[in-house]
Image (cartoon, helix red, strand yellow):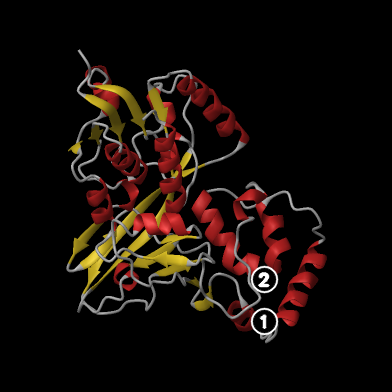
Amino acid sequence: MGKRYDYLVVGAGLYGAVFAHEMRQRGKRCLVVEKSGHIAGHIYTARVDGIDIHQYGAHIFHTHDAEIWRYMKRFTRFNHYINSPIANYHGEIYNLPFNMNTFNKLWGVATPHEAAAKIEAQRRAAGIETPHKLEEQAIFLVGTDIYEKLIKGYTEKQWGRACTQLPASLIKRLPVRFVYDNNYFDDPYQGIPKDGYTAIVEHMLEGIEVRLNVDYLKERAALSTLAERTLYTGPIDALYDYRYGTLEYRSLRFETEVLDMPNYQGVAVVNYTDAQTPFTRIIEHKHFAFGAQPKTIISREYSNEWALGVEPYYPVNNLRNIELYNRYAAIAAANKELIVGGRLGEYAYYDMDDVVARAIKRADLEPR
């Protein structure tokens, strides 16, 4: 007798939802199981007092890929939100990403030539020619002043390590622009779903059986009898009972409160870049959707060391973890009934458009 489902999808986050949707479009039978009590993974949004709360941190959809943008618009309507966060350094306010508004506020320069000359002078004074660590890379890109005020404290809080110990690769994508433009992303397509992110995943999973509060790792013996193949999107080391050791992550903690005022900080995201402020940023959720509600809701975000049982967020991509991941990935690749994908399965930090593209590509590899 054939099995009841073609695919068991472990995880109802964005990767799992896109994959399940694509396989259903191909006439395949899918069962989605999710450990938590809700779908949508880390892009989950909950509506409180008419405001969509980004429960697991700020998520702004942005992409340069017109096909991915069209794909996502099948499931939602996007607003015209442009990500323009600001930095607060002991009460001094600076624009992010680093641009001419930042340089003018910090140094009083008015032209790109003056700003570039200022950075070059600080780079020469620091004697940096080939950056190896994050501190050197930051000074090489934007000079000593910006590094000390707007990068060092924030980054060390975020990663729990000194910038002199972190790899330069973490900051190589840092946007630096010699124009008066506060748009953090240079992608042509950007916005926030008008009905929240959870609604996107709900639409993707229409017509697909979903079981919440199901721990696949505890019930895998029974669940594996239900489907021909399994897509697993959880932590890859947990899949193999940590036999070679645990991969490392950074985790996040949020303190969320409802405030009896219409506007707390005037922008969706404020990064606190000094070392003394214990949180890394404050998110004011209503500003993602241009909200006019009489109340507002803010979340203070704290970065923490990860431990087993704590929600993992950012992989720590050092040599030890990369080698460990490769050992687990080799085992998974040898199992022809198993697909491992997504942020945790691939031990990688992906933007949402990357997640969607990778899930579609994975679905396209499956037999028709």
To which quarter of the image does residue 120 belong? bottom right
Q: Please tell me which residue is depicted at 66% across the width and 53% down the height of the picture.
A: 134
Disc assigned to residue 107 = 1
**Observer able to see residue 89:** no
To which quarter of the image does residue 74 belong? bottom left
* Relative depth, front residue between 207 and 80: 207
Tag 2 secondary structure: helix
Q: Is residue 221 above or below residue 267?
A: above
How many discs mark residues in the rendered view?
2
Q: Amino acid at mark 2?
A: Asp
- Measured in 3D between alpha carbons, the distance from the residue under mark 1 to the one under mark 2, in whole angstroms, is 9 Å
Horizontal and vertical percent for residue 279?
A: 42, 60
Q: Is residue 70 above or below residue 85?
A: above
Q: Please tell me which residue is depicted at 51% across the width and 78% down the height of the picture.
A: 93
Q: Residues within 10 Å of mark 1 (few under 14, many from 20)?
A: few
Q: Please tell me which residue is depicted at 57% across the width and 48% down the height of the picture.
A: 161
Horizontal and vertical percent for residue 143?
A: 71, 68
Quadrant of the frame with the C terminus: top left
Q: Amino acid at mark 1?
A: Trp
**Observer able to see residue 100:** yes
Task: Kindly check if marks 1 and 2 are in contact, taking CB atoms under 8 A apart as contact.
Answer: yes
* Relative depth, front residue between 148 and 180: 180
Q: Residues within 10 Å of mark 2 (few under 14, many from 20)?
A: some
Residue that carries the numbered disc 2 in the rendered image = 145
Q: Is residue 6 left or right of residue 90?
A: left
Horizontal and vertical percent for residue 362?
A: 43, 36
Q: Is residue 145 left or right of residue 201?
A: right
